[in-house]
Image (tube, rainbow, N blue to C red):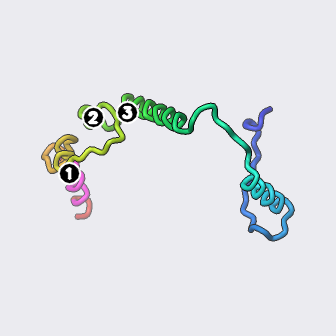
């Protein structure tokens, strides 16, 4: 039987530094970890690791964007993700997504508003 199958974990809050033995030991170990630390060395520069993580993040993000079920109107205009800011005006965004003062878009809400208004009568 593994811990995941029979997990009985209780979490609680204990006011710090009031003489509770387990809490005092935990505080001492935490302090030791921050002062002593664990020596770590990487076989490559941190910049390499950051670049690898960034590439992995973008790859996963693009896969989610490619297979997503929402944002299809935007996807047809911007199929590739980017971390560069796009400087689109509000009007351009409304036009590109068809979410603006257009009869086809507003019709979805007007019928709902009319139904709600009729109920109040």
Do callouts 1 and 3 mark residues in contact (Cβ within 8 Å)? no
Q: Which residue is mark 1?
A: 90
Looking at marks 3 and 2 on the same chain, the residue that comes earlier in the sequence is marked by: 3
- Dot 1, crowdedness within 10 Å: few (<14), some or many (≥20)? few
The relative height of residue 12 versus residue 94 in the rendered view (above or below) is: below
Between discs 1 and 3, the one toward the N terminus: 3
**Where does the image place residue 20, in percent across and percent down from the top left?**
84, 65
Determine the CA span between mark 1 and mark 3.
22 Å
Do the residues under discs 3 and 2 have CB atoms within 8 angstroms? no
- Judging by the rendered image, the residue that carries numbered circle 2 is 78
Q: Is residue 54 magenta?
A: no
Q: Quadrant of the C terminus?
A: bottom left
How far across and down, in percent of the image, does residue 49 sit?
A: 54, 35
- Label placed on residue 65: 3
Which residue is rendered at x = 13% and y = 46% of the image? Answer: 103
Quarter of the image for residue 40 reads top right
Please say if 107 is above or below 114: above
Return the x and y of residue 86 as percentages of the image width and height.
Answer: 26, 44
Q: Which residues are magenta?
A: 107-117
What secondary structure characterizes most of the magenta part? helix
Which residue occupies the extreme left position in the image?
103
Gap in angstroms between the C-alphas marked 2 and 1: 16 Å
């Amino acid at each position: 039987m593994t811990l995941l199958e029979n997990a009985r974990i209780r979490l609680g809050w204990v006011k710090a530094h009031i003489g509770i033995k387990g809490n005092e030991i935990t505080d001492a170990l935490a302090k030791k970890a921050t002062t002593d630390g664990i020596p770590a060395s990487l076989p490559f520069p941190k910049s390499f690791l950051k670049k690898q993580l960034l590439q992995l993040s973008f790859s996963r993000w693009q896969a989610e964007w490619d297979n997503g079920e929402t944002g299809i109107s935007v996807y047809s205009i911007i199929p590739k993700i980017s971390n560069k800011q796009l400087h689109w005006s509000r009007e351009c965004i409304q036009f590109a997504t068809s979410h603006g003062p257009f009869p086809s878009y507003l019709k979805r809400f007007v019928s709902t508003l009319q139904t709600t208004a009729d109920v109040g009568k």
